[in-house]
Amino acid sequence: MRLIDSHAHLQADRFEGEADEVAVAAQLASVERILVPGWDGASCRAAVQLAGRHAFLDAAVGVHPHHAAEVDDHAWAEIGALAVNPVVGAIGETGLDYDRALAPREAQLANLRRNLELALRVGRPAILHCRSRLGQRDAQDELLTELRRAGVGERPWRARFGDRPPALLHSFSGPPDYAQTALELGLAISFSGLVFRPGEDASAEVARLVPTERLLVETDAPYLSPPGTPRRRNEPAHVAVTAAWLAVQRGDDPEALGRDLVANYDRIFREGR
């Protein structure tokens, strides 16, 4: 089965000194494309440097909600300059995290708005992290409000992105109606090893809702190891476990799904730059 990993933090500390080796190992395991997202200024620089060394890697640059209150104007100026680098395929990861809540909500909202403005300006889709505490959905609902506030799905975004998704819900978590509204706004949805965790049962239903052309899969490496893989460090090669789960949930032929995933990755992250 052909594979992609639409979200792997290969520049994270757990890959220190081994990022290139891990990337090549994934390629040998049929992972044809890997997106490496940043979360602050230093990690964005590292993502661009890593993607510059391997043609099958792409970078994403932006500010994670955990770091929303930390990134200053100088770092933002650097991220804005990096955003137009030819190896950059997306803006992020950004979003809202009301589960761990490592930054105040107002700082997270301001940061999300800044990332969305950058995505529209440079024509790269926004990668959206969204977590609420177990049994709650306040982050999901507020994210949808912010997407509407930014005009996602309206004329300026359609003019910039055409039929490409202007953003994607990374490592999906939330109820089906949240996913349905995001799809109506034109977003793509990506699934990770999170689908195997307790409390994420709705992901199986959502996996069947997503149109084929807006479907992605990821590891979120080095986090969210799927069953049967080392918990110490998730790696892009392990995306095969979640891709197999996705094929079963959707009743798809794995080979056909693999071809679609590669095509979706290229259209979402590599067109228009």
Image (spheres, rainbow, N blue to C red):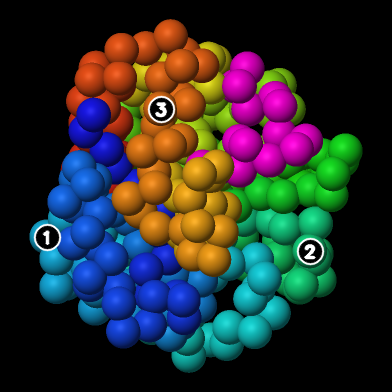
Nearest the viewer among 78 and 173 is 173
Is the Cβ of the residue at disc 1 closer than 8 Å to that at disc 3?
Answer: no
Q: Does 193 lie within the magenta span?
A: yes
Q: Magenta region: which residues? A: 192-206
Q: How crowded is the residue under tag 2: few (<14 C-alpha within 10 Å), some, or many (20+)?
A: few
Q: How crowded is the residue under tag 3: few (<14 C-alpha within 10 Å), some, or many (20+)?
A: some
Q: Which residue is mark 2?
A: 100
Q: Which residue is mark 1?
A: 55
Residue occupying image coordinates x 53% and y 86%: 73
Real-space Cα separation, disc 3 to disc 2, in angstroms:
30 Å
**Mark 3: amino acid:** Ala
Residue occupying image coordinates x 57% and y 53%: 224
Real-space Cα separation, disc 1 to disc 3, in angstroms:
26 Å
Residue occupying image coordinates x 41% and y 53%: 7
Q: How crowded is the residue under tag 1: few (<14 C-alpha within 10 Å), some, or many (20+)?
A: few
**Mark 2: amino acid:** Arg
